Image (cartoon, rainbow, N blue to C red):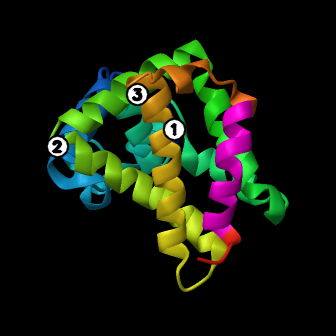
Amino acid sequence: MPEHVAPKSRRRGRPRGGETGARERILASAIEEFGEQGYDGATIRGIATRAGVDSALVHHYFGTKADLFAEAVGAPMRPDVDVPALLAGPRDELGEHIVRYVLEMWERPEVRKRGVVLMRHALGNRLATPLMAGFLSRELVGRIAAELGTPDAELRATLVASQIAGLLLARHVLKLPAMTAASVDDLVAWAGPTVQRYLVGTP
């Protein structure tokens, strides 16, 4: 290269030409960081430090912390991505739409398989339980509560999460006969009004 030509600078966050295994190191470090610090306590900077890379490289490979968490635990659904679109719909149909969205997603074999494994792991592992709780609290309950904007919004959103979790647990983990035999439409008809009341109704 001629002396008067400056070398091209590497774009921030892009992997170096010879840097191999960075993505795998980041993912392994994320699993450790989330396991030790919980979802809320874990940071992109901390994960980057563990992996020996720049924080921008973590964002380059995985995007947001929620993206990285979903990749690390194999989360079958992305409430941080999907819930805002659901909440943007008609307020008087929120309950039905949320229940239908979740149930129809879990009818997909690839989602159900990963979801059941994740739910069983979260219920039976002392480290995984608070980790999943933190993720759902921030990315699901927190987003619903922010949209509702009422003094009791967090309680309402938590009741929604408990209703949805109960449906999935009974239908796909415990496999209670009546729940597995019911159609999605039937379950939406039963549970939708309850979720709707949690969202906008009066106690």
Question: Upstream in the sequence, badge 1 or badge 2?
Answer: 2
Q: Is residue 110 above or below residue 124?
A: above
Mark 1 neighbour class, 10 Å CA radius: few under 14, some 14 to 19, many 20 or more: some
The quadrant in which residue 181 appears is top right
- Residues 14 and 55: in front is 55
Question: Upstream in the sequence, badge 1 or badge 3?
Answer: 3
Q: CA distance from mark 2 to mark 3?
A: 16 Å
Magenta stretch: give its range. Answer: 186-199
Identity of the residue furthest to the front in this view: 178
- Residues 18 and 203: in front is 203
Identity of the residue furthest to the right in this view: 90
Task: Determine which of the numbered discs, if any, sits on residue 74 in the image.
Answer: 3
Give the residue displayed 41% in from the left and 59% down from the top: 137
| Residue depth check, mark 1 versus mark 2: number of the one nearer the observer | 1
Q: Is residue 99 magenta?
A: no
Which image quarter is the C terminus in?
Answer: bottom right
The residue identified by callout 1 is: 167
Q: Is residue 79 left or right of residue 188?
A: left
Residue type, numbered disc 1: Leu
| Residue depth check, mark 2 versus mark 3: number of the one nearer the observer | 2
Q: Is residue 38 left or right of residue 2?
A: left
Q: Is residue 188 magenta?
A: yes
Residue type, numbered disc 2: Leu
- Residues 139 and 98: in front is 98
Instruction: Where is residue 144? Give x, y as percent.
Output: 59, 64
